[in-house]
């Protein structure tokens, strides 16, 4: 366990804590920053998969509408 400075109030807090006990600011640990995935885990989360799927769907709709508009003029 190491002590780090809170990014909001500057107090010394544990690097394992989820939030600063003085001001309540979430720490990098609780936000998931600086953590490596465990063996067998991917850093590509379900949220990333959902975002990528929605992006691909929107691009297909946009290009389909553009194609339709250009070929049926």
Image (cartoon, helix red, strand yellow):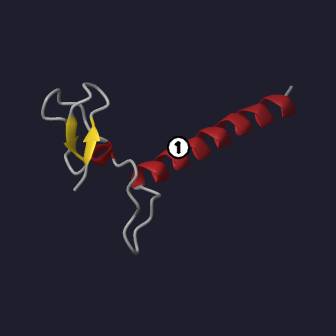
The image quadrant where one finds the N terminus is bottom left
The image quadrant where one finds the C terminus is top right
Is residue 21 left or right of 34 when viewed as pictured? Answer: left
User: x%, y% of residue 33?
Assistant: 38, 47
Residue at image location 29% in from the left, 48% down from the top: 29
| Quadrant in the rendering for residue 57 | top right
User: x%, y% of residue 54?
Assistant: 53, 43
- Given residues 34 and 31, the one toward you in this image is 34
Q: How many marks?
A: 1
User: x%, y% of residue 70?
Assistant: 84, 30
Residue at image location 57% in from the left, 42% down from the top: 55
Q: Kindly identify which residue carries mark 1.
A: 54
| Quadrant in the rendering for residue 27 | top left
| Label 1 Cα neighbours within 10 Å, binned few <14 / some 14-19 / many ≥20 | few
User: x%, y% of residue 65?
Assistant: 71, 33
* Residue sitting at the far left: 21
Dot 1 lies on which element?
helix
Residue at image location 41% in from the left, 54% down from the top: 46
- Given residues 20 and 63, the one toward you in this image is 20
17 versus 66 height, above or below: below
């Amino acid at each position: 366990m190491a002590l780090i400075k809170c990014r909001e109030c500057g107090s010394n807090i544990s690097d394992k804590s989820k939030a600063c006990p003085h001001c309540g600011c979430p720490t990098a640990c609780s936000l998931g920053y600086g953590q490596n995935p465990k063996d067998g885990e991917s850093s590509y989360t379900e949220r990333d998969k959902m975002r990528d799927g929605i992006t691909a769907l929107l691009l297909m709709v946009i290009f389909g509408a553009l194609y339709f508009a250009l070929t049926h003029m």
